[in-house]
Image (tube, rainbow, N blue to C red):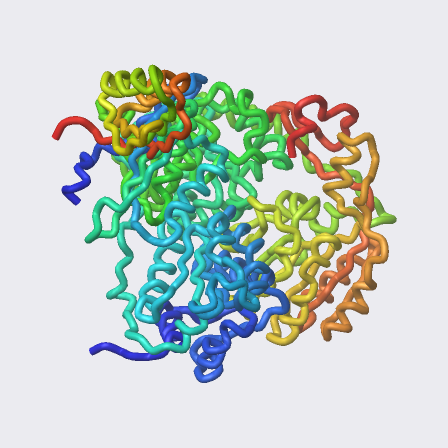
Amino acid sequence: MSALNIKKGATSHSAYELRDPHAEVIETHTLAVLVDNESGVLARVIGLFSGRGYNIESLTVAEVDHKGHLSRITIVTRGTPQVIEQIKAQLARLVPVHEVHDLTVEGPAVQRELALFKVVGTGDHRVEALRLADIFRANVVDSTLESFVFEITGTAEKIDAFADLMRPLGLREIARTGIAALARGA
Amino acid sequence: MTKQMTGARMVVQALKDQGVEVVFGYPGGAVLPIYDEIFQQNDIRHILVRHEQGAVHMAEGYARSTGKPGVVLVTSGPGATNAVTGMTDALLDSIPIVVLTGQVPTFLIGTDAFQEADTVGITRACTKHNWLVKETDRLAETIHQAFHVATQGRPGPVLIDIPKDVQFATGTYTEPAQARTGHYQPKVKGDRPAIEALAALIEQAERPIFYTGGGVINSGPEASRLLRELVDATGFPITSTLMGLGAYPGSGKNWLGMLGMHGLYEANLAMHDCDLMIAVGARFDDRITGRIPDFSPGSKKAHIDIDPSSINKVIHADIPIVGDVTEVLRELLEIWTARGRKTNRAPLERWWGRIAEWKQVNCLSFRNSDKVIKPQYALQRLEALTKGYDRYITTEVGQHQMWAAQFLHFDDPNRWMTSGGLGTMGYGLPASIGAQIAHPDALVINVAGEASWLMNMQEMGTAVQFRAPVKQFILNNERLGMVRQWQQLLHGERYSQSWSEALPDFVKLAEAFGCKGIKVDHPGDLDDAIREMIAYDGPVVMDVLVEKHENCFPMIPSGKPHNEMLLGEVSTEGAITGAGAALV
């Protein structure tokens, strides 16, 4: 499981750690959920969110330990502190769930998302798109005489900003992966 | 040495190895190989139900009256979908049930084959966990895992979907000891500093109360024993949810009665005014809390529960203790004993004084009649005439259920089975059969309303076939009593669809099933009728014609706090207004 590099014992789905339950502030949290990669496990997690009325802002899933058949689901969710604690407790009691980590409260974490942008245009727009892509460190992964496909990696905010800039320059399509996140440090 | 056998034989072998004695089920195309194996053995008894919903409720009655998991075997498609209500019921009441469903062969899955349904998809939301087994080699291990998941931590229903070709194929049997039960090992020991903090609060509390629930029953008889020791040693008052009745004896001196929407006045007022609430295996259901901001506003709350998601879900716990009730109570008693078993005697005395004043209200009083049978009176007589019997009670859902909880007393756990969380009409009759199958010589009574009872009445056939002498005590008001009560209180007395016309003649119906029918409509005849019901050696359907418009009190209207209860004699006009009317 070393490939996963999740700190042991840092799990904060404990009932003992509730922040002010009466706070009505809406927080955004990034959760890393380690699950058995078995049939239906994603449906179980998504069903929990839809069945109990929780939000999913972003969700990514892939097997990260092929030998142990473990998948890592990264979920960005929003809610009051009480709702966030409920989400973690509800996730933790699903049978195929091994660990639930709240990367938002467990210390600093890096979050990255990959996106592909198709931008169509000629002349000045095309030149400007390429110039901005360079500033955003986006790579050109496909090109025709009147289009580019850019590949960009970064935080969700960076990708949003890039989308805002590309829109007047002929943005046609975006494909985003959703957020992958890891805690910083050893 | 590896044991080779067919999947169907594996099912029977795994059930035997899990100590299963009874299976409630109904055959069909996709489970024929398993039924063939059941035919060829005598260790496991099969109870043939009349509808798959009945099978699950019977398994619930069996599980709740024994503490052992109940087992259900049904076919694919409609067999599985008919079991959904029962599984949802078991999920909400945390009852350990293992449901085995047949499935179309793996090579037909996804083709809309005859009697195909996406059973694991449909039941994902109504089971604790479920499995579709695609290889015979994995079948036995999965069944052992299923029993582990159903019974460990907070119990609940699980389902194993077994395609027909997996039942026919030969594979290697896995013994229970070799089955990987994986990482699913819920925490049972409580956090010691939290338990110490609770012990300190017990010493200081001036107005304490124990609020206990079904978790105490689920934890096993030792939990009830420890609870009794703790309650009696502290001298604290105790109330319980509908699910928890019997954990502390109804005849115990510290017993305040059930709390909640139709709970006792003294229990609800004590909850509202307490300064220390010790919640044990209870989950602050909306039927308990009433209006959340007004729920016991001045108390510190300790919450003992095996499910971390129950804690802080509804009500903030000042002292959360995640653990098994037995383990936590044992440790709490140890710590509190080591500290000298102190309580705050003088204020506690005054607290009991206030409780005694509330008891004076006599909230269960009702105006009796010598002309018609009042439902409360019928239950008082049932209680009096069944004293001393080895008695198990099940109920359906509605007014009769609340009256049964108020007027019948339970001195032991596992004696009271009712659909608490889901409120499933049609639960009681099959549950009574399940309890009777587990306790053949006991007196098992289903306190029912006529409308609920009709929902699963076909199971009387099961009772007759398997000689389960269950007593169906039907309080017949020819109304959907609780619906009618709510329509009276908050829908302007417009009684939309809440009366029963064209009811069957219950005596003839009983006789048609081959059991005894008794009808009673006069208070003077009631005692003899109850005695006749008890004495009869076989199933009885007793039709008790009761007052049609009796309301169930006390009642905390939806959206009201505990200290705004309605009592029987007060006017109920305008009791539920505004936002409360939108609640259920």
Q: Quadrant of residue B138?
A: bottom left
Q: Is residue A43 left or right of residue B270?
A: left
Q: From the viewer's perspective, is residue B220 above or below residue B528? A: above
Q: From the viewer's perspective, is residue B152 above or below residue A115? A: below
Q: Quadrant of residue B149?
A: bottom left
Q: Nearer the viewer, residue A32 or A80?
A: A32
Q: Residue at x 40, y 19 (%)?
A: A167
Q: Residue at x 51, y 23 (%)?
A: B296
Q: From the viewer's perspective, is residue B387 above or below residue B479? A: below
Q: Nearer the viewer, residue A179 or B439?
A: A179
Relative image position of residue B467 (x, y in whole percent): 61, 74
Q: Nearer the viewer, residue B355 or B272?
A: B272
Relative image position of residue B553 (x, y in whole percent): 70, 36
Relative image position of residue B46 (x, y in whole percent): 51, 74
Q: Quadrant of the N terminus of chain A?
A: top left
Q: Residue at x 36, y 52 (%)?
A: B152
